[in-house]
Image (cartoon, rainbow, N blue to C red):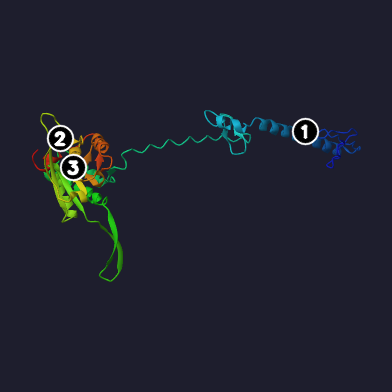
Amino acid sequence: MEAMPCHDQRVGGGGGGGSLPGGASRPPQPQGSGEAAAAAAAEDEEDRESVAAASRQLRFADRSPSPDSSGSSSSGGGGSCCGNGGCCHPGAACANGEAPQAQPSPPPPSPSPSPHAAQLKLLPMNDQIRELQTIIRDKTASRGDFVFSADRLIRLVVEEGLNQLPYTECTVTTPTGYKYEGVKFEKGNCGVSIMRSGEAMEQGLRDCCRSIRIGKILIQSDEETQRAKVYYAKFPPDIYRRKVLLMYPILSTGNTVIEAVKVLIEHGVQPNVIILLSLFSTPHGAKSIIQEFPDITILTTEVHPVAPTHFGQKYFGTD
């Protein structure tokens, strides 16, 4: 096949023909002045530089990683993309003189949710709750400050416990005749306190629900076997149809609550309608209760390895 003639021919000096990029021969140039010869020489030098630049770009493209090797080069010491279409090696500058950009580190794996997260609920922590917890734990706090702080913390827990109860939507009429869309709690709730420290929470429940019925359970540890033993239980006769707010401020081992729930089950109460209201809990106590009754709900202000077990004695003044 014959070579096509070049249509971009430049006129240069000298009688000899030059060579163009790609092997095309330059036609003989007519003799001219010294300025024309210098211009032709400059154009030849420019052509050679263009060929060298194209060759460098081809060699640079050949060094680019293939798609199959991109995964291996991007991890474990691979090059980092500089944003100009190329890929730089560690410690080397980009072709345009820019420093290579560091590869962003992969995000840390998200912590797996606790299997008990749905059953164990904590009050949102704030400075007010933190201060009340501090006073209750302080051994130098007076009994008056202790009881006052405990009653405030109990009220917060009870209020949050009521939020766990079912409700229905309703419409009321305001004194100005305006229709207001609101909610009201469904009937059929009751409280059960585990004596003796659980009785400290009864007044807080009555302050929120004036006519609520409250049952009682007396459980003590056997001196010989050290196991929790039920000595007394008194509930509303229709407790099996009610939602139960079980009150016990301190969860240490969880054995007392486990025995109390067993008594409620014997009276027809299902664990999924029991909401345990507590002030402080240990991780072991909460875990043991949920493992025994996966459907129960525990509401507390703090989960800490050390629980204030002196609560009942100091609250009732028998310490």
Asked whether the residues under the numbered discs 2 and 1 touch, taking CB atoms below 8 Å apart as contact, a structural biologist would say: no
Provide residue 206's location: percent of width, then percent of height.
16, 53
Using the image, tell me which numbered label, if any, was put on residue 147. Answer: none
Provide residue 88's location: percent of width, then percent of height.
59, 32
**Residue at 80% in and 37% down:** 43
Type of the residue with mark 3: Glu
Say which label, 3 or 1, has the lower sequence index.
Answer: 1
Mark 3: secondary structure: helix
Using the image, tell me which numbered label, if any, was put on residue 228. Answer: 2
**Residue at 77% in and 33% down:** 48
Type of the residue with mark 1: Arg
Q: Residue furthest left?
A: 318
Provide residue 97's location: percent of width, then percent of height.
61, 35
Asked whether the residues under the numbered discs 3 and 2 touch, taking CB atoms below 8 Å apart as contact, a structural biologist would say: no
Write down the residue under mark 3. Answer: 266
Type of the residue with mark 2: Ala
Image quadrant assignment for residue 210: bottom left
Write down the residue under mark 1. Answer: 48
Judge whether 227 appears above or below 182 on screen: above
**Residue at 22% in and 47% down:** 157
Tell me: 114 left or right of 196. Answer: right
Query: How much space separates mark 2 and mark 1, taking CA atoms?
Result: 97 Å
Query: How much space separates mark 3 and mark 2, taking CA atoms?
Result: 16 Å
Say which label, 2 or 1, has the lower sequence index.
Answer: 1
Say which label, 3 or 2, has the lower sequence index.
Answer: 2
Query: How much space separates mark 3 and mark 1, taking CA atoms?
Result: 99 Å
Quadrant containing the N terminus is top right
In this rendering, does residue 233 appear at all?
yes
Q: Front-most of 238 and 198?
A: 238
